[in-house]
Image: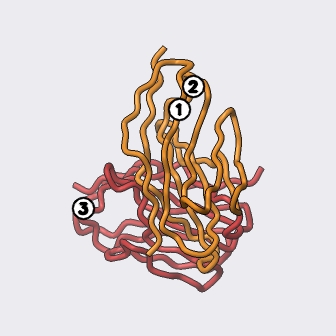
Amino acid sequence: GDSVTQMEGPVTLSEEAFLTINCTHTATGYPSLFWYVQYPGEGLQLLLKATKADDKGSNKGFEATYRKETTSFHLEKGSVQVSDSAVYFCALSVNTNAGKSTFGDGTTLTVKP
Amino acid sequence: DAEITQSPRHKITETGRQVTLACHQTWNHNNMFWYRQDLGHGLRLIHYSYGVQDTNKGEVSDGYSVSRSNTEDLPLTLESAASSQTSVYFCASSESRYTEAFFGQGTRLTVV
């Protein structure tokens, strides 16, 4: 079945450091790819998405590019802030299942001042 | 604004009791989902529905059931609560595979 593998955490960075969280998948066909963020005590919320190859999703300084050849959707941010501390989930949705998503295990990011 | 709400936010119940967690969305989405979140397992799909009267089992459906009598609601029932079902439960809805899922705030369930 479809699976999502993302970089294990936890990840601890200093403020203004560069962030990369790797994400790869095994879905065939043309999945839509998502990054969600979960702040403490809250549900998941969409951070960014890409629905076809070579699309770049971006939001709040975060970016991720849908790479079909490497089946990857790595999350990046050039300069993290303390407020970015959260759990980040990579997810996919394939065209055969009308919106049913498969999630990675999540990566916990802590940013220190 | 449209939203998705779960109730209760916290619940403590005893082993063997039946428990129902509520989920209500005002997005008018056909697709609704229940996930559980456990440390080390990410989110795992319990049940999902693509519309009224439609329900499907996810990867961890044993001991859980859902029913969909209208577009807005997808209640999750634990038939006989077990300690292994202590978890945080999230409900979500989506319009299609091209759009994101919208999540509720979660229900923290403890089975003692």
**Relative to B69, is B81 on the left or the right?**
left
Instruction: Tell me if mark 3 has few (under 14), some (14-19) or many (20+) residues whose alpha carbon lies within 10 angstroms of its own.
Output: few
Q: SS of the residue at dot 2? A: loop
Query: Mark 2 highlights which residue?
Result: A80
Secondary element at tag 1:
strand
Q: CA distance from mark 1 to mark 3?
A: 35 Å
Same chain for marks 1 and 3? no
Query: Which colouring convention does the figure follow?
Result: by chain
Image quarter where the C terminus of chain B lies is bottom left
Whole-number angstrom distance, CA of label 2 to CA of label 3: 37 Å
Q: Which chain is orange?
A: A
The residue pinned by badge 3 equals B84
Mark 1 and mark 2 residues within 8 Å of each other at the beta carbon:
yes
Q: Residues within 10 Å of mark 2 (few under 14, many from 20)?
A: many
Question: What's the colour of chain B in the image?
Answer: red
| Mark identifier at residue B112 | none
The residues tagged by marks 1 and 2 sit, at their Cα atoms, a distance apart of 7 Å
Camera-nearest residue between B94 and B4? B94
The answer to whether residue A32 is left or right of residue B27 is left
Closer to the observer: label 2 or label 3? 2
Q: Amino acid at mark 1?
A: Leu
For the point 50% across and 64% down, which residue is it? A102
Q: Residue at x 42, y 38 (%)?
A: A108
Q: Residue at x 41, y 27 (%)?
A: A12
The outermost residue toward the right is B1
Mark 1 residue crowding within 10 angstroms, few (<14) / some (14–19) / many (20+): some
Residue located beneath label 1 in the image: A19
Q: Chain of mark 3?
A: B
| Amino acid under disc 2 | Val
